[in-house]
Image: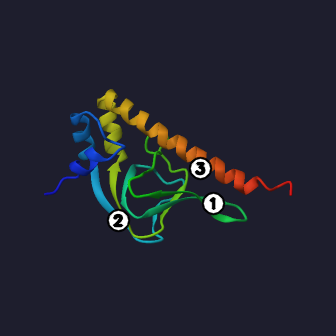
Amino acid sequence: METLKPYLEEHPFLKDLRPDHLDLIVGCASNVRFDARQFVFREGQEANQFYIIRHGKIALELYAPNRGPLTIDTISEGEVLGWSWVVPPYHWHFDARAIELTRAIALDGKCLRDKCEEDYELGYELLKRFTGIIMDRLQATRIQLLDLYGDQNK
């Protein structure tokens, strides 16, 4: 049986993790695929995973009244999708929809939360890495809001 470990240990997000921590993460990983226009998750749903995109693109969307869905960010090959599994109450804050056929590695958030409770060093290391992703998403949302409301005085 082929393991995801070689891919995960080389991925920039997980690179240089302690070998025992990487083994714990690999134990929570599986391959997934999403067809074009398929939702990966919906705002408000329980967040119990995150994804490392291997191929394809995912649109992060925010619904705006009178405008419909707005694409806040596009997640592509090599990027990480999903941070809401880290922060209680563990619900998604955006919709995520595949733009095209997308293959990814899904990491089970419940599995990882349990492992982080047992090993605080692993939890701290993952939290440090996810903080950057959270900041990137907040900046992307800020830029979209500026675009949405920036021309109000014209």
Q: Please rate how many residues cluster around mark 1, counting C-alpha atoms within 10 Å: few if below 14, some from 14 to 19, many from 20.
A: some
In this view, the mark in front (1 or 3): 3
Does the rendering let one see residue 134? yes
Image quadrant occupied by the C terminus: bottom right
Decide which of tag 1 and tag 3 comes sooner along the chain: 1
Residue at x-position 86% and y-position 54%: 153
Badge 3: residue crowd in 10 Å (few <14, some 14–19, many ≥20): some
Q: Classify the position of the N terminus by image quarter.
A: bottom left
The image's colour scheme reads rainbow
What residue type is disc 3 on?
A: Ala
Dot 2 lies on which element?
A: strand
Mark 1 to mark 3: distance in Å?
15 Å
Front position in the image: 12 or 92 = 12
Q: Is residue 23 above or below residue 145?
A: above
Q: Are circles 3 and 2 on residues that touch, CB within 8 Å?
A: no
Disc number placed over residue 100 in the picture, else none: none
Seen at 33% across and 49% down, the residue is 107
Between 76 and 60, the residue placed more toward the observer is 76
- Outermost residue on the right side: it is 154
Residue at the far left: name it: 1
- Per the image, label 1 sits on a secondary structure element best described as strand
Q: Quickly name the residue at label 3.
A: 140
Q: Give the amino acid at mark 2.
A: Arg
The residue singled out by tag 1 in the image is: 63
Per the image, the residue denoted by label 2 is 33
**Quadrant of residue 94 in the image?**
bottom right
Instruction: Please give left or right for residue 128 compared with residue 67 in the image.
Output: left
The spot of residue 46 in percent (x, y) is: 46, 51
Element type at mark 3: helix
Q: CA distance from mark 3 to mark 2?
A: 25 Å
